[in-house]
Structures are given as C-alpha cells and as structure tokens.
Amino acid sequence: MRFVRKTHYVQDINIIKHGGQRFWYGLLAVVVVLAPLGLDRFYLGELSQVFIYAIAGIGLMLLMGYTGLVSLGHAAFLAIGAYCHTWLLGHGVPFPVSLFIATLFTAGVGGIVGIPALRMTGIYLAVATLAFAVIVEQVLMHWESVTGGFRGMAVPKAEILGWNITSPTSFYYVCLGLLTAGLLVALNLLRSPSGRAMIAVRDSETSAQSMGIHINRTKNLAFTISAGFTGLAGGLFAHKIGYLAPDAFTLLTSIQLLLMVVVGGLGSLHGVVYGAIFIGLLPQAIAIFRDVVPPAVSQLPGLEPGIFGLILVLFLIYEPQGIYGRWLKIRLYFEEFPLYRKATHKRQKSYLRTERLR
Amino acid sequence: MEVLQLLISGISQGCVYGLIALGFVLIYKATEMVNFAQGDIMMLGAFVAVTLVNVMGVPFFWGVLGTLVIMAIVGVLLERLLLRPMIGQPHFAVLMLTIGLGFILRAVAGAIWGNEPRALNTPYVGKVIRMGELVVGYENIAIVVGTALLCALLYLFFRFTRLGVAMQAASQNQLAAYYVGIPVKRICSLVWALSAVIAACAGILTAPVSLIDPLMGFVGIKAFAAAIVGGFGSLPGAILGGLLVGVTEQFAGLYLPPGFSEVSAYVLLLVILMVRPAGLFATMQLKKV
Amino acid sequence: MSLLVANNIAVSFGGIKAVHDLSFAVDAGEVFSIVGPNGAGKTTIFNLISRIYDMDEGTLNFNGADISHVPAHAIAEMGIARTFQNTELFDRETVLKNLLIGCHVHRRTNIVQELAFLPSVKAQELAFRKQAEDVIDLLDLQNYRDQVIGNLPYGVRKMIEIARALCVQPRLLLLDEPSSGLNPEETEDLSFWLEDINDDLGITIIMVEHDMNLVSRASDRVMALADGVLITIGTPAEVQNHPEVLRAYMGD
C-alpha cells in the first residue's frame, strides 16, 4: 500500500502527484509513442479512432460528469466541428488554422446553445439537447450549398508544410498529440477555480451562488468548453471517415458518446479514456462474436445496437461506477491484500429523492 | 376544408403521441424514472397483437384483451429485472438504462418477427365517414375515442383511489412512503404494468394508420418531446402536448419547406421550454433553503 | 456604526406575509441574534439578505451601499457569507475542495489563464490553499481534510459549513441555526469559536438561534420576531424577560 508523504501544498496541486504515478504514466507514454513501430496501419487507425472518441468524451464528461448537465445530442457538436473544418479545408485554409477555427466555431455554437439552456434543468435540458441535435441533423441534410445535403462532402487530404497528415502514422501522432493536450487542458481546468465552480453548480446551486459563483456564466462556460472539445474531435473525425454525410451524426452517435462516458466511469478523465477504448474496440469484438455465433443470430440487422444496449444495461445495474470504478476496486484489492474486505464497497441502500424540488 | 382535414389527422396522430406520453408521465409520476423505451414497448404490444390476431387467428376483441394482459406481465417483468436494482440511483442513470433497453427490445423484436412491415387485421379498417367534403376514417375516430376513454379512467384512478395517491407519495419521497406503510415495490410494478398496457393500446390503435415494424418505436422520441411540452408530471399536460405536437406537424408539413415537418415537434419543444422551462403545466418548485 | 441596515422590508409568499414592515440595524463588530418561534421569518430574512428571495418592499443597506437589487452571486464579493439551516455542502467532494470553493470570491485570474495553468494561477492556488488551511486550523478540522462530505457526521458538517463561509473572508457572517443537531459539549465549543471569529477576525455575526443559552452567552444584542413582525430588539436579558416575547413562545 502506498503512503504518500506530503511536505508542500504544491504536491496536491500538481497533476502528477508522486513517483509511482510518474513511473506508470511514463511507461504508458513510451508505449503509446512507440506503438507505430510495432502495429500495422489497421490498428493504428483503430487507435486513432479511440483517441478521437476520447477527445469528444472529454467534452461530454466536462458537461455531464463535472457540471451535471445531461446532453443527449452531443453528436451535433461533432457534426458542426467536422463540417466546419472540412468546408474551411475545401476553401484552402491550412490544416492547423482550419482545425483551430472549427474548434472555436463549435465552442461558440455551444455558448449560444447554452444560453436558453440556462433556465432548464434535468430531463428538460436533456430533451432540449436532443431536439437541438435533431434540428442540426436536418439542417445538415437540407442546407445543400454549404453541406452538400444528402450527397455529403469529401474531406480533402491535409498537410502541414508538405508533410501529409492523413497518412496513418502521421494521423496517429496528430490525434495522440491533440488528446494529450486536451487532457492537460481539462486537468488544468479541473484544478482551477473555474473547474471547482462547475462542480459546485452540480452539487448545490444555491450555496454555489452564496459563495459568489455566477451560475449562468459557469453553465455557459461548461457548454462552450464542452462543445469546443467535441468540435475538435469532429474535425479529426472528418479525416478519419474521409467522406462526410448526415447519417454519420445521428441520435445513435450521441448515444454512443453517452455510452462511452457512462461505461468508462462518470466523474473522471480516466473514465473517458477507458470508455473510448471500450467503444473503439467494441465493433471488433462484435465482428468476432458474429463469426463465432450461428448465422441466425449473426445476420440480425439490429444486433450491434442490441449488444450496445445489453452492455449498457449490464454496466448500469452491476457496475455503475464504470470501468474506472471497477479498476479502482481491483487495485484496492491488491493494495490491501490479504486484508481486503468485500464490504468496503457496499453502500447504504439508497432511496429515491424527488428531483422536482431543487 | 383542407385545414379541417389536417386538423383531424393532427388530432388523431396527436392522440397517439399523447397516449405514449401518458405512459411516460405515469411512470415518472410514480417513480421519477424516465422510460425512454416507452415507444419500443408500444412496438412490442403491436407485434404481440399481430401474433394473436393475424397469426393465431384469435378474434379481434379477445386478441386485444390478450395483448393487454401479456403486456401487463411484460411490464412487471421489466420492472422486476431491470428497474428494481436501479432504485435510488441518479435519474439520468435510469434514463440511460431505458435507452439501452430500447435497443435490446428492437433487436429482440427484429429477431422474433423480422423487419418486414406488417399490418394488423383490424375490423374497422378502411371504413370512413363522410361529412360534406370531410373524410374521417374509422381508425381516427377509434384513436380519439380510445384516448379519451383511457384518460377518463386514469383521472378517476388518480383522483379517487388510495392507490393513486400512494403512487404520487412514493415518487416524492420514497423513504417516507416506506415509513407510512406504502408498498413501494408493488406500486412500481403496478405502474409499469399500467404503462405497458397504455403503450399497447397506443400500438393497437395506431396500427391501422401506420404499419408495424421494429423501428416504429422511434415515434416515442417525439412523444417524449410532447410529454415535456406538457410539463413532465402532469397527465393532462401529456395529452395536450401530444395534441400540440401532432397538429403542428401536420400544418408544418403543408405550409413549410421539406424537412421542417420532421423538426417541427422539436422546434415547438424548444420554443415552449424557453418560455416555460419546465413545460406548460410545470410541476417543479424551488427548494426552500 | 451600522454595517447592515434593513428599512421596512416585507416579503409575501402567496397569501402569507413571511416578513412584514421590518426594520433593524446591525453594528459593525457585534454578535446579533435573531430569535423567534418557528415560522417567524428568521431564515427568510437571511434569504433576503443573500438575495435568494426578492423583497416586495423596503431597502437593505450594507456598508453604506444599497443591496436591495444586487444579484445573488454578487453578495459574497461584497463581504457577506452565510451558512444554511439544512447544510448545503457539496456532498460528493472532499472537505478541502469545499473550502477551496469558498475562496472563489478572491479569484483574480480569467479562464484562459486557468486553462493554461500559468504561474499566476498556480500562485493563486497556493494562496487559496493557505487560506483554507488557516480556517482548518482555526476550527480543528485537520482530521477531516481529505474526507468526502457524504461520509461525515452531522455535527462536523455544520462546522464545515461555517469553515466554508469563513474562507470567503467576509465582513458579515450569517449563521442559520449553527447549534441545531449539536450536543451540549459541541455547542460550548461553538460558542468559543464564535467568540474567536468575532474578536480575533473582527467579523460581524448575525445568528438565527433557538438555543437560549448560546444566545445569552454569545450575543451582544438580540432581535425577537413572531409571525414576520418585530417584537423587540435589546440585550439578551432584556429580550428574554420581555412580556411579548414570553407570550409568543409560551402562548397566552
């Protein structure tokens, strides 16, 4: 079991808190950076997809896990980022600038969407985001001059100073770099007053106000930053799928993002990464499952969403803390071995308290 | 005349939304859970009816009754297996659970009945009433009458029976409800059974108007929007919301460019939420600190 | 010198006049208690001062400035902090995080600086931590620093509410029933802490209380209310023996 001896406040403020974390994260960094040497282009592509999901997941997690605002329509921000970036690239804007502008634009839209959302809570907000996503989907389908409508748009190849970004290895590093930067920015946010303000708004609006926190500004900030992250992911996603069409950004996509955040573990950035790995690997696992199972089952068109649903249900009932939560329990077992008690995680039976009185 | 015709289709479609919305609100009033799979339960009910009436040849009336009984049992089973472990969990966790449930139901329905659209053999399909230039199908009348009947029954139930009051108590403070001797778990099961029955009614009533296939449950999302418009927690609000959405859709389809009728329900929702953030008949109050 | 002045404030909810035509003044540096039976409007006054409710009539002055229409989140910055009758802590976070959120009013950095975590932000974080630690030392909360609020007993939570309010470094502290749920020993400790807060930190305290012993021991002046109307203001001894007050508490 690890006992950390703290001698200075700065140890609590730093992102990496002690030698053990330095070792393991360092090892992870080495493995991830050297991966292209050992993996072929297919797996590099899959890992890039995982990174992209993770960036989108950071956005959703900041909104849901840390500010407590449920969003059922985050695919809309993914779409806005993707289409904006592609349109700019098509008009000759260099890749880094285009990505940056797409991120800012999506963040701006998030801020605007956040304004009416300030007065809504709980399920009302969730449905409003759902409505927003459906409307965006329709706009994508019918605004032919900009989005290409049902035909969609091809995503141009991108390069920085002659270096082709969209080759598998380069794209892998771009995604990895942006994910690392994103995680650092999110961690900075969470250890600063703005991040704490978000948590305060989640747990008790009245007392947050009495501490001087501007509720509306905080919620709006959460929407803006969340949309920005997801927009960035959208821009990268556009390169990954190569051709944009409205049916890549449906309700199912929003639910997939939600699934990632919930299954990974709500309330931590670790959860985002685990969730992204899970979502990224799920299609492969289902493909393998299809080969193993008799044709009567494997030919079903509703199989993939059905398995999604089943996994979601099982996780919510049996491991509501998600993959990260389960990992923490496993780690605790090894840390406390042989003194581990199963009752450590047994929580007092909880009862329903109405949400209609806030 | 065209306006009146649109109004009739709007009201009839609105009643279907309203019935599904009723199921949502019922579960919410009793357990504060949002059941995103309500539309898919409707779909299941419709398929069960098809099996009984079309495939097994049961006479229509008994087929409907049998469907209602089977769906009530399905509702209880779903509650027992899936929702009971979730009591006390945060609300959106339950929302996500029901979203997952919706996926599972669709996959199961597709596996059992296939994805080809079916029609239910209803005795009154095809017959119409003509009033001047107005054509009103029997099925539309059936929908409206069926909805009105169900609403009346539910109103009486909640107003005058002890069970109705107990349901509301259980949703506001479960622990307190336990203390005063309300059988909370049994009430939850009952509510889910009731909700499934209402959904099955909606499925049977709408079957002549739209064909039955595993994806018909997506209308549930619009019904959800309708329930929110009415104020989630108010039974008359659910019906009113459904009617508003149904009528708005029909008129948007006629007077606005393509694509607008699809989103009209959602635009209506956003407009109403911006003006009244908790729906038309809001049931939220500010906590006294 | 008056720090807080209320002039003829009134507020009604539906048909009930929660507070009616109330005027009082609180001097800087004193401990001012508000007593009265349940439903007298005591917590309502706090909610009016914190601007959670809007007044129907009357004005409120704090330190010479009119705060009758100031938005709720600006009150903390003006130097007023409060605790809540049913503790409104951030239940899923640790005690330390709760206190750090209390320091929010002293924030001088903007969001861009924070996203990049510039040295100015780090310096501010260290300053906040020092502030929180000072409050922890004052109220002896060292053992609870890293524990999640949800796991702590009620008495400790009440102290953390006060600690969090102290992190605001207010000029005026509003305490809503600080001793409810505390046993006699804890109440005695509380009275010593109130003394420390008032004398050493120079903070003016307004306290809603039911425990008459605590009121007598700790307060300079007391205001008695019943049904939203003022009965009297005076020293603890005067108020306790006032015939109207006795009638309001004991009945006729």
Image (cartoon, coloured by chain):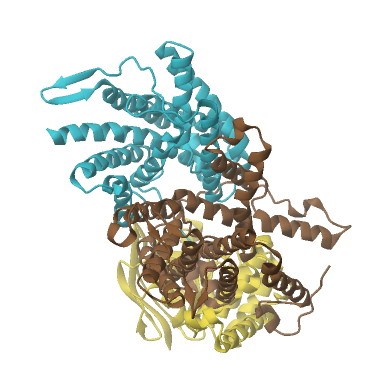
Q: Position of residue C129 (x, y in %)?
A: 63, 82
The N terminus of chain C appears in which quarter of the rendering?
bottom left
In the displayed orientation, state which residue is furthest to the front. A162
Asked if residue B127 lies left or right of residue A107, the reply is: left
Q: Colour of chain B?
A: cyan
In the rendered image, is residue C52 in sight? no
In the displayed orientation, state which residue is furthest to the right. A338
User: Residue placed at 62% from the left, 85% from the top?
Assistant: C126
Say if B126 sits above or below C32 in the image: above
Q: Position of residue C43 (x, y in %)?
A: 47, 65
Q: Position of residue B158 (x, y in %)?
A: 42, 32
Q: Position of residue B32 (x, y in %)?
A: 50, 44
The image quarter containing residue A37 is bottom right
The image quarter containing residue C132 is bottom right
Say if A358 sits above or below B189 in the image: below
Q: Nearer the viewer, residue B187 or B93?
A: B93
In the rendered image, is residue C139 in sight? yes
Say if A320 sits above or below C219 in the image: above
User: Residue placed at 63% from the left, 61% from the top?
Assistant: A271
Q: Colour of chain C?
A: yellow
Q: Nearer the viewer, residue A286 or A126?
A: A286
Q: Nearer the viewer, residue C35 or A309?
A: A309
Say if B119 sits above or below C154 in the image: above
User: Residue placed at 42% from the left, 39% from the top?
Assistant: B218
Q: Nearer the viewer, residue A106 or A49?
A: A49
The image quarter containing residue A339 is bottom right
Q: How many marks?
A: 0
Q: Colour of chain A?
A: brown
Asked if residue A178 lies left or right of residue B4, the reply is: right
